[in-house]
Each structure stands twice: as C-alpha cells, then as structure tokens.
Image (cartoon, coloured by chain):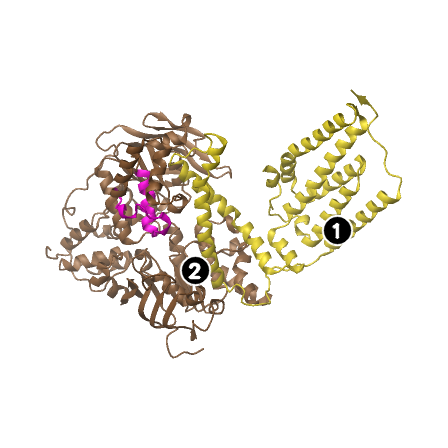
Chain colours: A brown, B yellow
Amino acid sequence: MDDPLGIIEARDLWYTYPNAPEPALRSLDVTVEEGEFILLTGPSGCGKTTFCRCLNGLIPHFYGGEMRGEVEVAGLSTRDHPPTELAQHVGLIFQNPDNQIFALTVEKDVAFGLENLGVDKDRMVEAVDWAMDVTGISGLRSRATHELSGGQKQRLAIASILAMRPRIVVLDEPTSFLDPVGAERIFDVLDTLNREYRMTVILIEHRVDLAVRYVDRVIVFADAEVLNDGTPTEVFTAESTRLSGVGIPRIVELSGRLSRRGVAMERPALSADAFIEEMERRLPQAGMNPPDMRSTPAPEVNAEEGGNSPILEVDGVSYAYPSGVQALRDVSLTIHRGEFVAVMGENGAGKTTLVKHFNGLLRPQSGRVVVGGVDVSGVSVATMARKVGLVFQNPDDQLFSENVEEEISFALRNFGFGGDVIEKRVDWALNLLDIERYRRSSPFILSGGERKRVALASVLAWDPEVVVLDEPTIGQDYAQKERLRHFLMQLRAQGKTTIIVTHDVEFVAECRPRVVLMAGGEIIADGPAERIMTDMDALKRASVSPPEIAKVFHGLSRLGLPPGIMDMDESAEILSRWLGGAAP
Amino acid sequence: MSILEGLRFSQGSSPVHRLDPRVKFFMTMVIFVTAVLFMDLIPLLVILLAQVPIVLAGRIGREWAKTLRGGLFFAVVIFATNIISFYFFRGRQLTSEMVEFALTLTIRFIALITSFSIFFLTTSPDELSLALDKARVPYEFNFAFITAIRFVPVIADEAQSIMDAQRSRGLELDKGSFLSRIRKYIPILLPLIINSIRRSLELAEAMESRAFGASRRRTSLYELRMGWMDGVVLAASTAALAASVYIRFFTPGFGPVLPSFSLL
C-alpha cells in the first residue's frame, strides 16, 4: 500500500456522541506521516480518547452518534471498514490492562487476535514469539495472566496488539496505573517499535516529563479542537499550551524561566541529560566556583514538626498476605499531629498494606499500631475509621448512592451523627471540595475528577484526625493535580495530619512533605522531601526515579553546583546567577 | 466453599495433566457411571482406591486432601441422615446392613468428588475450551466460559477493595439483625455491579480492537493431539467400564461385609 497522503488523514472531522449536546470533536484536521512518534495531550475531556476511537473505527461503527468529515487510516476509510478489519492496521491499547486481557495464559492471550483473524498456526507462532520478544515478556509465556504485575499486564496488552502486526499503535494513557519504573519500560518498548520497526506511535499521556524524551511531535487538544501541533519544544514553549492547563515538562519549564532571566538556551533541552550537556557546554562562560549558591538555606524541617505529640505510632509491624507474600517487614514509624507525609515506593513495596493498618483493615501479625494512644488491635475498624479516614484510589469502588448528598452522609450515619449535625457536615464538605452544585446529582454522571472529589468529601465530612489518600494523582491531568495540591496545602495549614501514598515524584517534589520511602516491605529512608527526593542512592534502591530538577542538579554537582535542589524557582535562580543572567 | 477450592485448576506437567481433556473426561465419566452402578461396599471401595494412583500420578495429593476436607461435612451429613432415617422408619433399630448401606453411600460420594476433583484439578480451562470447541459448541459460548473464569480473580480483587473502602467509611457488615445485615451489602454490591457494566463496555472495545468475530474460521494456538498415553487410558477406561457392567449384571453380586449385629 503506497499512499501519497499520510498514514492517518483526518479531514474536517466532527463527531457528536449519541444524546450528547456538544460535539466531542470539532473540525479536526490531522495528518500523521508513517514512522512518527506523537504525544497527544490535553486536559481531561478534551477529546483525545474520542480521537483514538475514530482511528480504528470504534467511531462510528461501535459508538454510533454523528460523524462528519473523513478519517483514512492506511488508505482505508473508517466509515467503510469495520474495526475488526482496521485492527490489522491500527492497534488500540487502553488504560486498564485488566480489561483487555482475554485468555488465561500469556501466550494464548497474545494469540487471541490472530485466532480471531483465522491465521494459520505456523504464522501465528512466529508472530506471537516476535511480539513477546519485543515487549520483553517471553519469559512469562506460560504464566497465568492474573498472576502478572500491572506493568507486565500492560506489556502483555501491547504484545497482544503487536502480534497482529499493525503499522500504527495508539495508546490511551497506558501507564496511568503503573509506577515510574513500569512506565519507563513501556516507553522503551514503544521507542524500539518506532525506531527499529518504523511503526507509527500515537501516545496519550499525562506524564509529559517522561514521554517528551521519546516523541518527535506533540499535539495538544483543548475543547474538542487541536490547539497546538508541532515539535515538543515549539508546542511546550507556546504560551497557549501553558494557558490550556496542560502540564509542561519540567526541563522545558526550567529553560523557559532561564530565558526570561536573560539566559537563552542554545539548544532547547527536553530531558535532564540533555540539559546537563547544554550546561556543560556553557562551562567556560560560567563563573568559576560560584560562592554562596543557595539563596536561602533549605529549611530543614524537623520530622517532629514543632514538637507536636505523636498521633500515629507503628512499632515493629510485619504482615504477610495469605498468599505468602511478605508485604511488611518490621516496619516502625511515628507520625506527629499536623504532619504532612508522603509514603513512596514502587508498586508492591508495601505502601498500601502499611496504610491499611492505620484504621485496622489489616491487623499486624507482629508488632503494634497505636493511633491517638489507642492500640488498633483491640478495636473495630469502624471505631478506628472515626480517627483515620482512608480515601482509596478508585472512587468507583465506593460510590453507590442516589445523589452526592446521600453519598457524603453515608459515613456520618454509620458513625451515628445526629440529623442536624449531618446536614451541617455535608454542607461543609460540599463547600470544601467545591462540589456544592452537584448536591442532587447522581455521582455516576460526574467526570472522573469530580467523582474523586466526592469520594474525598465523603471521608473528610466526619473530620477524621488523620486523612490518608491512596494514590490521589492517578489518572488526573495537570490542572486536577494542581487543584489537589492546593487542597492539600489548605489541609496542612489547618493543621490536619495528612498522609498521601503515591509514586508521583514530581507531585511530591512540589508538595514538599516528609517522605517515607519504602522498598520490599521496609522503610529505607525517612525525612524531609528536600533530602529524600535528592538522595540518589536511596531513590535507586526504592526504584523511584528522582524529580527532573533533582537529576539536573545531581548531574551538575561535579561542576561545583550544590546538589540536593529540586525546586523550580530556586533552581532557576541559582542557574541564572551562575550563568550570569540578569535579574528578572 | 472449601469444597470448590479443591476443584480449582492447578498448573502442572504431570502425566495426568498432559492427558487429552476428552480422554480425561471419558475416564471421569466411567468412574461416575461405575460408582452409580454399584450399591455394595466392596466395589465402591475398589473404585475409590483405584483413583488413588491417579491422584498420585497427577501430583495433586494436597489439593485432593483439601477437597476431601471440604467434602467431609457433606459426607457426615449423608451418613447421619441415612442412619437416622433408618433408625426411625425401620422400627427403631439399627442393623449391620443399615450401617453398611449408609457407609456405602458415603464412600460413593467420596469416590464421585474424587473423580471430579481429578478432572478439574488437572484440566486447564484453556484445554476444556478446546474440548468444547471440538464438540462443536459455538465459539460464543466457549468465549463466555473462558471470560467468566478469567474475571473471577479480577472481580474478587475488586470486591475486596470495595469492602475495604466501605468499612473505612464505618460500614459494619457483621452487626445488626439478619435483614439489616443483608441491606448492608447494598453499598458493596452496587459499586461491584456498576463497575462490571463499565468493564463490559471496555471489554467490548478491546474485543473489537482484537478483531473478535473477524473470521468465521477461527484458528487456535493450542491444538489437541492424542498420544500413546491417551490410547492406554482410553483402553483401560473402556475395559473397566465393560468389566463393571459384567460384574454388576452377570455375576451373583456381593453379600454384606460387616459382621452382623443389631443395636437398639
């Protein structure tokens, strides 16, 4: 097939879902050349996912609705060819790996598409072997699919699509549920496909810091339209991109701030490594050994935050799941009133297991957990939950009421609050999370970010002494994360003890909590974010990649710059003074 | 339901695991038929004991023990109800025949669960689906069967997360009257159902993306092939069936085994 046009051609594409008042895509014109690696980004609900569905014919064949304009993929009009046929040219990979695995063993799942196409056995075996090899799951060939880790499952989902040998792969937030290490492996696989097999890759991703290193073109969607389209540097330095609420890669942001201080970058860097190289090239211009680099001494936050009394004490706790997995090994931790703590580590490090001990969902097999002076082991979950409010990762695992008001009062009724108190508390929580207008709406019609806020409100309503949020940033776009960060700062200012469980390093770098770093069921480091998030050895042991700016300063420390810096403002200040830029 | 626990497939590469699922199914059916055929203690004991080498060859001793432990309750119920009903309906006395009969029924039950246990413990659902396919069961049913098995652990995990979330919001499942306890499961069942509906939509999208239903002539990565072991087992099962029928219908049969006694 030798098409004169691009491998994907969308011309004046409009689409409206059935019964939707507004179009989800408006007058889209996108041409993709074969072999491009494209990052598609934009705020939640901007039409990215809808666009992906147009590429393999799910729209209009599966979703119905009203489609105007033309989409051609590999020379085939998506209007005339059903998804089952387009599947051989364009492979779609979705966010949740569990919902795209159909077989019980790994290799059987990889073969599923080929079986459906009626490919004969010899060719099938060859394609399956190749797909497993490229994605690095050959060793898992005969494993049961439900035993795999999240990252392995997502690589399996990719292998299953690759086995059909499409020329284009489209991935819709494939790394949302993965930790940074798992995500990086996915990106490496995509990089190989693009470079070695000249596959066209379209990636929807909120992790722009990581993704931007691999792609050669960025398209930003906003409000059902294409806002910007160009090279990563062009797009991410455009003012309109910033204003649309899309996350800007930290390194691009840092370069931008430097140029505003009069230090222009010769070559725009997209990764920490490229940035370090660029700085090293400038070495001769820079002052020899800049004295007194730090504008302000880093505030060494005492772990005991003003000598407050402890609210949560974990003493020598070990826990093994019935399956035999040892999730916690002799963990000890003290958290004081009013502290803001982030528990970090890769998936399976024991983070969630640890916080489930805080309200008695799990009972320590040895050691003890004391909350506000009460030993958890002798008390019911309901009693402990009154003191420690746990907000879980997925709001859909808890929402069930007719309307938001009911949802929020559920726990209050369980705890036996009186009618007028419940009313007041519900009002308070609705206001706190800015969801007053949804009071009478069903929680199920709300967007993902709004559902998350309802879940949070339903816990904060009873004003627990300690609030624990499990992976609050997962699946959230940049604007939603910013909003969450402001909210957490507010809680902190009120003196509420807050604990977040997360593997979102950039979020932690911006919130600057006390960081408890876990690996293999143990706490391997504990201290202020400034120290832990710049401690390369500890981070490496925990398989947590450092924040971008910390990487830059770690790399530049051999040039005499102070290591241990991770703040955007501070780093821009230091670098511009070092490079002799003008004050802003 | 620990009795079901003992029926869950456990991966392995024993000779029993490697048997063709159709042959294994035939073997299981032979055991089933012969166990139903006889009503005497000795042949049923033979049927039970004959399965022990198969269990050992399949290296599923531990799982089998789990099945037996799960089935123990039912075995006791079968034995006790027989004894009790004999006692009350046959003139308030207990003879050796009655005890032997109750014992026979119990042994039959154990022999039956053992045969099913062997089949399900050593046959992967993938193989089962291939066998169904060979039996000309439409692929849609086959796919539904595999999908159901595939999502059992996923939904179990999800149910656990929902339970954790609601208990963290003060839901106490084990408090209150019977009716109010049932009502307390609503906050757990509703999210589970709604998530399943969402999931089914996502699954449908993913199926389309994997060309589900593209070709009428589906192929398969795994194929069933009979080996010499399958021939041996097939022949042995057929011989056992023939012998059982002969013994049951063309020989005088077995007398009572227990020494005769009579209790009040």
Q: Residue at x 34, y 32 (%)?
A: A386
Specify the principal SS of the magenta part.
helix
Visible residue check, residue A152: no
Q: Is residue A90 left or right of residue B227?
A: left
Q: Position of residue A109 (x, y in %)?
A: 53, 57
Q: Is residue B158 left or right of residue A539?
A: right
Q: In this view, does A56 lie to the left or right of A557?
A: right
Three-letter code, disc 2 = Ile
Q: Is mark 2 on a helix, strand or loop?
A: strand
Q: Where is residue A211 in the image (x, y as percent from the top left)?
A: 33, 59
Three-letter code, disc 1 = Val
Q: Residue tagged by mark 2?
A: A93
Depth order, front residue of A53/A458? A458
Q: Where is residue B210 in the image (x, y as percent from the top left)?
A: 49, 63
Depth order, front residue of A98/A540? A98
Q: Give the range drawn in magenta.
A: A432-460
- The answer for which chain carries disc 1 is B
- Disc number for residue B233: 1
Locate the N terminus of chain B and report the quarter of the image it occupies.
top right
Asked if both marks, 2 and 1, belong to the same chain, the answer given is no
